[in-house]
Image: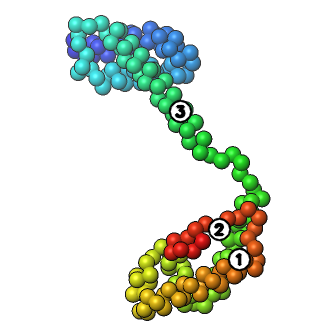
Amino acid sequence: MPDDIVKTDMIRLLPKLRSFALRLCRNPDQADDLVQTTCERAIRSLDQFDPATRLDSWMFRIMQNLHFNTVRDSANRARLFDLAMTDYDESYDGVQAAASSLELQKVQRFIGELDDDNREVLLKIAIEGRSYKDVADELGVPIGTVTSRLARARLKLREFLDSNGTAPGVKMQSMPGGMS
């Protein structure tokens, strides 16, 4: 059966396709989309159409499969959304977030006031996660110097935190390089 004849027969089937789509979707807009998608899929797959079969049966099967796929995909998306939402903490505490932000600003200011040598080592090891050896090589100093600078920076930071106290409920996270 030539493609032009098949396409003409498809056009004749549109009212029946729309009626079937309405029964499947129960929504006129979704039904129209389903009819359009069905026709697009059928035209793209004309080389798979067996002229010995009925065109309407073939197109109804395409439509039904598309609809079932859409329903299944929607159910999967809803399931994945529900899974993602279980990880979402609905108990966001604005007061706690503000206190944490203020505490972080104080710590950042304090780190900015450290001696350049101590600050540089602290940031490279505790923040960037670099190794003592890499920092020592970069600065051109022995590893022992890096270790002592880091220890001084940590001690000063610990003293600052102890004397100022952290905001209620703020927990210091363990940092790479042994800082806690």
Q: Give the quadrant of the N terminus.
A: top left
How far across and how far down the image is residue 131, in percent? 43, 78
How far across and how far down the image is residue 30, in percent? 53, 22
The residue that label 1 is drawn on is 161
Residue 8 visible, this orientation:
no
Q: Give the quadrant of the C terminus.
A: bottom right
Frontmost residue, 94 versus 54: 94
Q: Amino acid at mark 2?
A: Met
The residue shown at (42%, 92%) is: 142
Which image quadrant for residue 65? Answer: top left
Please report whichever mark, 2 or 1, sits nearer to the chain's N-terminal start.
1
The residue shown at (53%, 33%) is: 79
Location of residue 56 with respect to 44 vertically, above or below: above
The residue that label 3 is drawn on is 79
Q: Nearer the viewer's eye, disc 3 or disc 2?
A: 2
Which image quadrant for residue 151? Answer: bottom right
Secondary structure beneath dot 2 equals: loop
